[in-house]
Amino acid sequence: MARRWLLSSLLGLCCTAALFASGPTGTITGTVTDASGAVVRKAKVTVTNEATNAVRNATSNDDGDYTLALLPPGRYRVSAESSGFRRSVLSNVTVDVDQTVRVDFALQVGERVQLACTAAA
């Protein structure tokens, strides 16, 4: 009897884990390169849910690849930036359930411009 209970408990845990693993999420993946096609290592990739403003970050690996998984379905703004390159942004990237969306970036050489604002006295 105890053996049967243990077996059914383990089976229940496996089924529960499978349900959570295949939940209603999607993935954004891609490669970050420069204009010549050379990979950009350690580029910061930011994904922002356009409805909730929830932010997730990733860093491109030695092959220039990045992946952000387990994203709720919705529309996203995806940006990539790295020192010595201009920031690149793509909006309205739609992620559906169980979908992998590819967003590749070809960064342009240039510095990111920081605007400084001061309040008038």
Image (cartoon, helix red, strand yellow):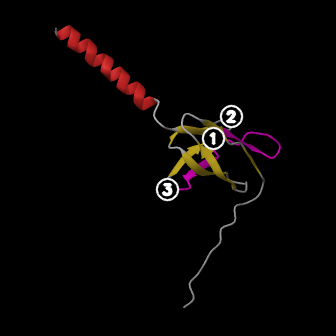
Tell me the CA gap for discs 2 and 1: 7 Å
Check disc 2 and report its element: helix, strand or loop. loop
Residue 29 location, quadrant: top right
Name the disc covering residue 63, or none: 2
Residue 47 vertical placement versus 115 (above, below): above
In the rendered image, which residue does mark 1 sit on? 60
In the rendered image, which residue does mark 3 sit on? 52
Residue 68 visible in image: no
> How far across and how far down the image is residue 15, in percent?
37, 22
Residue 29 visible in image: yes
* Three-letter residue code for mark 3: Thr
Mark 2 and mark 3 residues within 8 Å of each other at the beta carbon: no
Check disc 3 and report its element: helix, strand or loop. loop
Residue 49 counted in the magenta span: yes
Mark 2 and mark 1 residues within 8 Å of each other at the beta carbon: yes
34 or 79, nearer to the observer: 79
- Quarter of the image that includes the C terminus: bottom right
* Three-letter residue code for mark 2: Asp
79 or 90, nearer to the observer: 90
Check disc 1 and report its element: helix, strand or loop. loop
- The magenta stretch spans which residues? 30-52
Tell me the CA gap for discs 3 and 1: 24 Å
